[in-house]
Amino acid sequence: MKKENNKKIIPLLMWGALSLSSYLMIFLFQNEVLFYATRGGLFSVVPILFAFYFSFVHGAFASYLLPFIGVEAIIKKEAH
């Protein structure tokens, strides 16, 4: 089990760093993001794109983090 976790630590750290830096950037540059997001027209797509981006990055990070700390889904099979 330890060897399996060692293989997944690099993507875990990569996605974690990307997730953390993305949140840091959105908070550091929130005025610029808000300026473009509220301009209207084609710029109104900006918040939607940010939502998709953060959902993907955070989901990828969580998909490596949860098994690494030992949280796994339990799938119950129904009897036929």
Image (cartoon, rainbow, N blue to C red):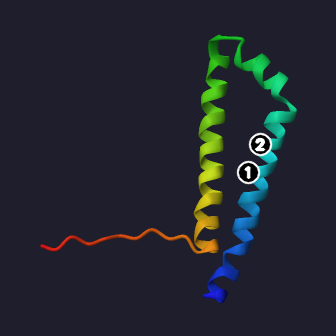
Residue 79 placement, left or right of 23: left
Residue at 35% x, 70% y: name it: 75
Q: Which image quarter: residue 26?
A: top right
Residue at 30% x, 71% y: name it: 76
Asked which secondary structure carries label 1, the reply is: helix
Position of the C terminus by quadrant: bottom left
Image coordinates for residue 64, horizontal then vertical, percent: 62, 66
Other-residue count near label 2 (Cα within 10 Å), few / some / many at <14 / 14–19 / ≥20: few
Q: Which image quarter: residue 11?
A: bottom right
Q: Are marks 2 and 1 in contact (CB under 8 Å)?
A: yes
Q: Residue 23 carries which label?
A: 2
Position of the N terminus by quadrant: bottom right
Q: Which residue reaches farthest top?
A: 40
Q: Residue 62 carries which label?
A: none
Image coordinates for residue 39, horizontal then vertical, percent: 72, 11
Kind of residue at disc 2: Tyr
- Position of residue 20 relative to residue 9, above or below, is above
Q: Which residue reaches farthest right?
A: 28
Identify the residue under disc 1: 19
